[in-house]
Image (spheres, rainbow, N blue to C red):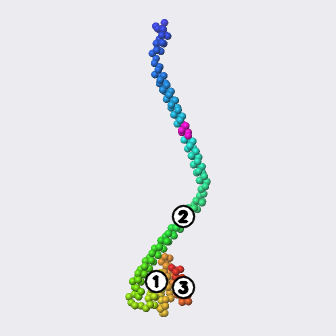
Amino acid sequence: MLLDEDPASLIAQCTTHFKLDSDRASLLRISDSLSTLSTFRQQHLSSLQSTLGRLNRTHQTLSSNHAHTLSQHNPTTHAAEILKLDTEKFKIAKQASDLEMEGERLEGELGRLGGMLGELESEGVEGGEREKGPEEDATILKLKIYRTLGIDVEADATTGQYNKAVIRNAAKGDVHVVNIDPKFSRHFYTSYFWRTM
């Protein structure tokens, strides 16, 4: 016989020395951990699927809006509108520049007229440093007023009558020479002078 002891008793002795309780507890803990991890993974996948679905719906909405916007866009109309707005912008800028120049011109003219008024007030009703006749005072006053408006009146060398007017328009940069003919009324020349200025 190979063994001195009975094999059954040897097996019984070996099995009594095995300690399986700790191994069973470890297997139970591993099983619980696997179950918990599986539940968490399933919940996480559900959350990701819900988020993905929401993002897909948002993407479809944005794509639809984008396609609608592109279908409504007309490059020709857009270019024409931009050109129209640019034209309006330049037109307004030119008008503003013209108004600024006109304001400066009127300010200068106002200053000249104010200086002329101060000079006339300092001369008083009698006017000037020497005594003049009423007709001479009126003529000089008219000539000064004409000059402040940019009109120079020239007298004929032979007759002494004022028969020529030179109208200067600083804003337009032009000069008009008008020969005064007695057959036309003063109203006609007054209207013409104002239109020329």
Question: Cβ–Cβ below 8 Å for labels 2 and 3?
Answer: no
Disc 2/disc 3 C-alpha distance (Å): 45 Å
Disc 2/disc 1 C-alpha distance (Å): 44 Å
Disc 1/disc 3 C-alpha distance (Å): 17 Å
Q: Which mark is residue 86?
A: 2
Residue located beneath label 3 in the image: 187
Q: Is residue 69 magenta?
A: no
Residue located beneath label 1 in the image: 145
Q: Quadrant of residue 123?
A: bottom left
At label 2, the amino acid type is Asp
Q: Is residue 173 above or below residue 61?
A: below
Q: Position of residue 20 (x, y in %)?
A: 47, 19
Question: Cβ–Cβ below 8 Å for labels 1 and 3?
Answer: no
Q: Is residue 46 magenta?
A: yes
At label 3, the amino acid type is His
Q: Residues within 10 Å of mark 2 (few under 14, many from 20)?
A: few
Front tag of 2 and 1: 1
Q: Using the image as rendered, state which of residue 182 and residue 79 is in the foreground.
A: 182
Q: Position of residue 97 (x, y in %)?
A: 49, 70
Q: Residues within 10 Å of mark 1 (few under 14, many from 20)?
A: some
